[in-house]
Image (cartoon, rainbow, N blue to C red):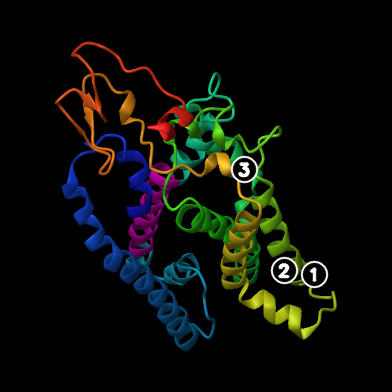
Amino acid sequence: MAHGVSPMNRDIVKHNDRTLMFSIRWQMPVIPFFKTMVALMGIVSASAAQEIWGTAYWTPLQIIDTWMDTSGGRATAFFCASIWELGQLSVNISANAVSFANDVTTLAPKYINVRRGSVFVAFVGGWALCPWTIVASGKAFLNFMSAYAIFMAPMAGILFSDYWLVKHRRYDVPALYDPRGIYRYGRYGTNWRAVVATFVTIIPLLPGLANKVNPSLKLSAGLQNLFTFNWLYGFFLSIFLYYFCNLFFPAEETLIPRIITGFEYLEGVEVDTEAGSPSIDGKIGDSKIEAGTHASPRSSSQVQDR
């Protein structure tokens, strides 16, 4: 839930509230700590189940199923299941539904909003993905997570490389929402550098994925070992591939000298171009805007010329 709340509340806070940065001091140690504790509790629970019932139950739902012999056990199972149901609803509403809805609204904003996108993923996507087959067994779940990682790792690596190494955190935020802006990357709107990095990273992992789906397929030991650490392989290889593609074939139009936040377009406010926070003096850079007037958006090229 800590991850899911951020996309919901990032637009309802003051952008010039510098105290928000202090939350990072707590999130950096606390979130990894609790994730590690949850993983450890799963390991301990499975090991304890092996000692008590002779089976290493991989899901808590299987553990509470063994409590049904007494009335007290059934009551405990009811309360535990209710808490887990509340947790699933909270996570899906605050994280999964909102993030999916934000994505699909960009595909057809005329017809899809956040509410409709959330309803769609709840009633259509939840059934189409057949989640009951994913959690049918521990082996099926691990196979799904392995397949999930080979696609998500290069995506994360490319985003990391573009933000930190290629663009150096300098983006034209309004242009991100302009279908004809500098981030269109050519006629077809596709950044071929990202496509190349993705496919080159994924292709060596596909034999390992096929072997997980169908164990009867013969696979060399090297490819099996490569698949076992597919996340690390995919993440770091995609970082370097994407970086070197941009190093030798840069998209010059996207390399801007400073961040363009969009605050430059606000009425009657001053924009600190270094900090990106508005004030009330009515200035924009070197120019001044009178109260009640509107600063018309400028193209990225005009901003670069300043």
Marks 2 and 3, the one that precedes in the sequence: 3
Label 3 Cα crowd, 10 Å radius (few <14 / some 14-19 / many 20+): few
Q: Which residue is mark 1?
A: 214
Quarter-of-image position of residue 201: bottom right
Disc ID at residue 205: 2
- In three-dimensional space, the C-alpha distance between marks 1 and 2, rounded to whole angstroms, equals 14 Å
Disc 2 secondary structure class: helix
Label 3 vs 1, first from the N-terminus: 3
Give the residue type that dot 2 points to.
Leu
Q: Nearer the viewer, residue 267 or 234?
A: 267
Crowding at label 2, few (<14), some or many (≥20) Cα neighbours within 10 Å? many
Can the viewer see residue 135 in this picture?
Answer: no
Residue corresponding to mark 3: 127
Q: Is residue 107 above or below residue 202?
A: above
Q: Are marks 2 and 3 in contact (CB under 8 Å)?
A: no
Q: Where, quadrant-wise, is the C terminus in this rendering?
A: top left
Q: Residue 67 appears in which quarter of the rendering? A: bottom left
The residue stretch that appears in magenta: 75-95
Residue 300, magenta (yes or no): no
Proximity of marks 1 and 2: CB atoms separated by less than 8 Å? no
Dot 1 crowding, Cα within 10 Å, few <14, some 14–19, many 20+: few
Answer yes or no: is residue 304 visible. Answer: yes
In the image: residue 227, left or right of residue 33? right
Helix, strand or loop at mark 3? helix
